[in-house]
Amino acid sequence: MTESPQKPILLTGASGNLGRMLAKALAAEGFALKLTDIAPFPDPLPAGASFTRVDLNDGVALLRLAEGCGTILHFGGVSVERPFEEVLGPNIRGLYHVYEAARREGARVVFASSNHSIGFHERSETIDADCDFLPDGYYGLSKAYGELMGRMYWHKHGVESVFIRIGSAIPEPVDARMLASWLSFPDLARLIVRTVVTETLGGCRVIWGASANARMTWWGKDDREQLGWAPRDAADGFAGQLAGKVSGDPVIERYMGGAYCAIEYSRKD
Ligand code: 15L
């Protein structure tokens, strides 16, 4: 750990792919962790970590769990496109519970937002962090709402937030789109450390969650300098094998959100 002793970190979604990776990486850095998820934690508990099974719909349990925490890393909830009714509880009500807990504890929220909050921007554009939200489904819409909720909690209650609009955070890129959108696990882990140790944010900060990929021309200015983060990895080495791996679907290939844009797409023009 680089700076002053930290209060414990609450990590929601700890049993998911990103949660498991972050639990390991943050524990290795010496952070005290309270892990939570609706699903059991599948790995051996890292040193300095506890795990409590909680449904994000249960606001009382979440308040109790957040007691004494200085940061809430909110990676819980539905993480793919699903029908509205499935997204509503975990991603909207659950998020409200997270922000209420942060308000009570005076904690910072680091929100795993997504590129799907802006998914209907065309790939030919370069958009800055203050661009319009153009969600590509109910999941992306919940991420846009989450960022708006964070802004409300800053202006009304002084709760600081970092919104990470994650591209494609998986161990390796698997198609041509990810030559632009890929975010390596180490780059994400280093970013999360910066979101925790940076002393003051003075509001809400937005980060485009992509590695230093040569094809990442879609996403421009954001608040990385203030956090002291710059990605170090790149998908470029995969270009030879992945450049031709495209869908052939004009909707998927036109927009940043890719396949999510084409789910139940019914426009005729
Ligand atoms: C996301 O937000 C999803 O959680 C993930 O499963 C991927 O679909 C990713 O975006 C992506 O756009 O590649």
Image (cartoon, rainbow, N blue to C red):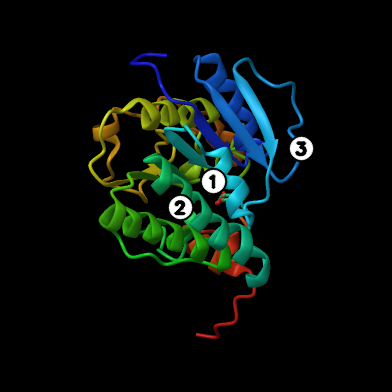
Q: Which mark is residue 40?
A: 3
181 above or below 67? Answer: below
Give the structural element (helix, strand or loop) at label 3.
loop
Identify the residue shown where x is 55% and y is 15%.
Answer: 28
- The three-letter code of the residue at mark 1 reads Leu
Give the structural element (helix, strand or loop) at label 2.
helix
Identify the residue shown where x is 43% and y is 25%.
Answer: 7
Residue 245 visible from this viewpoint: no
Residue 103 visible from this viewpoint: yes
Looking at the picture, how far across and down is residue 29, in whole percent?
Answer: 49, 15
Badge 2: residue crowd in 10 Å (few <14, some 14–19, many ≥20): many
Q: Which mark is residue 63?
A: 1
- The three-letter code of the residue at mark 3 reads Pro
201 above or below 258? Answer: above
Looking at the picture, how far across and down is residue 168, in whole percent?
Answer: 54, 44
- In this rendered view, identify the residue nearer to me: 111 or 120: 111
Q: Is residue 219 left or right of residue 269?
A: left
Q: Is residue 227 left or right of residue 66?
A: left
Q: Earlier in the sequence, mark 1 or mark 3?
A: 3
Ligand 1 under 8 Å from disc 1 Cβ: no
- The three-letter code of the residue at mark 2 reads Glu
Give the structural element (helix, strand or loop) at label 1.
helix
Residue at the disc numbered 2: 100
Badge 1: residue crowd in 10 Å (few <14, some 14–19, many ≥20): some
Task: For the residues labelled 2 and 1, say whether their Cβ atoms are less than 8 Å apart.
Answer: yes
Report how far apart the C-alphas of labels 3 and 2 lie in the structure: 24 Å
Q: Which mark is residue 159?
A: none
